[in-house]
Amino acid sequence: GEDVEQSLFLSVREGDSSVINCTYTDSSSTYLYWYKQEPGAGLQLLTYIFSNMDMKQDQRLTVLLNKKDKHLSLRIADTQTGDSAIYFCAERRAAGNKLTFGGGTRVLVKP
Amino acid sequence: DSGVTQTPKHLITATGQRVTLRCSPRSGDLSVYWYQQSLDQGLQFLIQYYNGEERAKGNILERFSAQQFPDLHSELNLSSLELGDSALYFCASSPPGTGVNEQFFGPGTRLTVL
């Protein structure tokens, strides 16, 4: 996923907020997604945002999209130990259904 | 549980061999996607099928091929295996007719080539 970049690692204390960042390069992206991968498991879709939106909130999750800067973030409020996982952002471009994934951010929640 | 099943869970084989990975999509989903996840390449899209027909191709090697059968299950065939093919192979499926294209991932098949 050389067109979608994420930082490698984030450490956060239980109860704090986590913010995971992602940048992408294709301005034709239509939808952007956040997936979670727990150890030994497949990817689980957490949330998504349509490219004409700036923000989407879903319970503890808030997605912010800055289209001008091609920057996407995922905020997890009140982070729990069960949130420890690898988080992937992905973009879907205007042409086709394939997703291009970032390299993933490993989030470690410390008690 | 996403509803997507993949078999086998683990596969260990030798260089030069051929293997087949199998995927059953969620009930009602017509699209199947194959992805390869490795430490050095990350998560890479390989190929997509929709209702039996190839729809999109990504970074899939010529040694690899896939197909989707009338019952919508899909198989990914990997031949002349090399050490570098060791990876997690995921299958995902998505329902028809939604602009969102939510993809539901299976648990993956871990391939080890010795």
Image (cartoon, grey):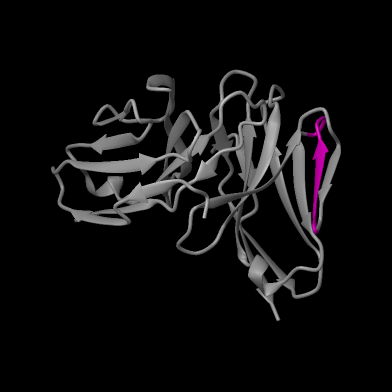
Q: Is residue B58 left or right of residue A79?
A: left
Q: Residue A84, how many percent across, how many down?
A: 63, 67
Residue B21 seen from this side = yes
- Location of residue A61 (image quadrant): bottom right
- Location of residue B91 (image quadrant): top left
Q: Is residue A40 left or right of residue A58?
A: left
Q: Is residue B102 left or right of residue A79?
A: left
Q: How many marks?
A: 0
Dominant SS of magenta comes to strand
Q: Is residue B84 left or right of residue A18?
A: left
Q: Residue at x 81, y 63 (%)?
A: A77
Q: Quadrant of the N terminus of chain A?
A: top right
Q: Residue at x 56, y 21 (%)?
A: A96
**Residue extending furthest bottom?**
A111
In this picture, is B111 found above or below A78? above
In this picture, is A96 found above or below A15? above
Foreground of the two, A68 or A40: A40
In this picture, is A97 found above or below B45? above
Q: Residue A97, how many percent across, how many down?
A: 56, 26
Residue B88 seen from this side = no
**Residue extending furthest right?**
A54
Within the magenta stretch, is there residue A62?
yes
Q: Residue B114, how many percent across, how many down?
A: 19, 56
Within the magenta stretch, is there residue A65?
yes
Q: Residue at x 40, y 51 (%)?
A: B108
Q: Residue at x 43, y 23 (%)?
A: B51
Magenta segment: A60-69
Q: Residue A67, how many percent across, how many down?
A: 80, 31
